[in-house]
Image (cartoon, rainbow, N blue to C red):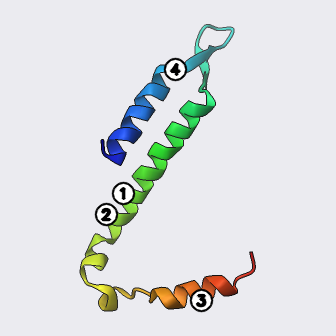
């Protein structure tokens, strides 16, 4: 099963456990989601954000490392080592 399918399955299972909070007027006023459901929802949203980011950069990525302005890993790793934690 792909990561996307796993996230989708987890999200569907989480949404099945949603409980609505009803106000005095009888109208839904909130939603209760257990911790596992919340995590599944966050994973799904993060996956959507990652996909949108890659899609938005696809033309730049197709241009190749030099034309896209990519950084060399060695330079990035060195900068990260020098940053305070």
Q: Position of residue 35 (x, y in %)?
A: 62, 32
The foreground one among 24 and 59 is: 59
The foreground one among 22 and 12 is: 12
Judge left or right: residue 74 versus residue 24: left
Labels 4 and 2 touching (C-beta < 8 A): no
- Which of the 4 quarters of the picture holds residue 25? top right
Point out the tag, 1 or 3, that comes first from the N-terminus.
Answer: 1
Secondary structure of the residue carrying tag 2 is: helix
Structural distance between the alpha carbons of marks 4 and 2: 32 Å
Residue highlighted by disc 4: 17
Residue highlighted by disc 2: 55
Point out the tag, 3 or 2, that comes first from the N-terminus.
Answer: 2
| Most distant residue in the front direction | 1
Structural distance between the alpha carbons of marks 1 and 3: 28 Å
Q: Badge 1 local density, few (<14 within 10 Å), some, or many (20+)?
A: few
Residue highlighted by disc 3: 78
Point out the tag, 1 or 4, that comes first from the N-terminus.
Answer: 4
The answer to whether residue 65 is above or below residue 11 is: below
Q: Residue at x 70, y 83 (%)?
A: 83
Front disc: 1 or 3: 3
Structural distance between the alpha carbons of marks 4 and 3: 46 Å
Labels 2 and 1 touching (C-beta < 8 A): yes
Image quadrant in which the N terminus is located:
top left
Q: Position of residue 61 (x, y in %)?
A: 30, 77
Image quadrant in which the C terminus is located:
bottom right
Q: Badge 3 local density, few (<14 within 10 Å), some, or many (20+)?
A: few
Point out the tag, 4 or 2, that comes first from the N-terminus.
Answer: 4
Structural distance between the alpha carbons of marks 3 and 2: 28 Å
Q: Badge 2 local density, few (<14 within 10 Å), some, or many (20+)?
A: few
Which mark is on residue 18? none
Q: Position of residue 40 (x, y in %)?
A: 50, 38
């Amino acid at each position: 099963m792909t990561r996307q399918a796993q996230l989708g399955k987890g999200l569907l299972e989480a949404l099945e456990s949603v409980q609505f909070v009803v106000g005095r007027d009888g109208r839904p006023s909130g939603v209760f989601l257990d911790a596992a459901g919340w995590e599944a929802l966050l994973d799904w949203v993060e996956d959507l954000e990652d996909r949108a980011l890659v899609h938005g950069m696809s033309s730049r990525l197709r241009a190749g490392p030099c034309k896209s302005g990519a950084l060399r890993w060695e330079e990035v790793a060195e900068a990260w080592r020098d940053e305070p934690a």
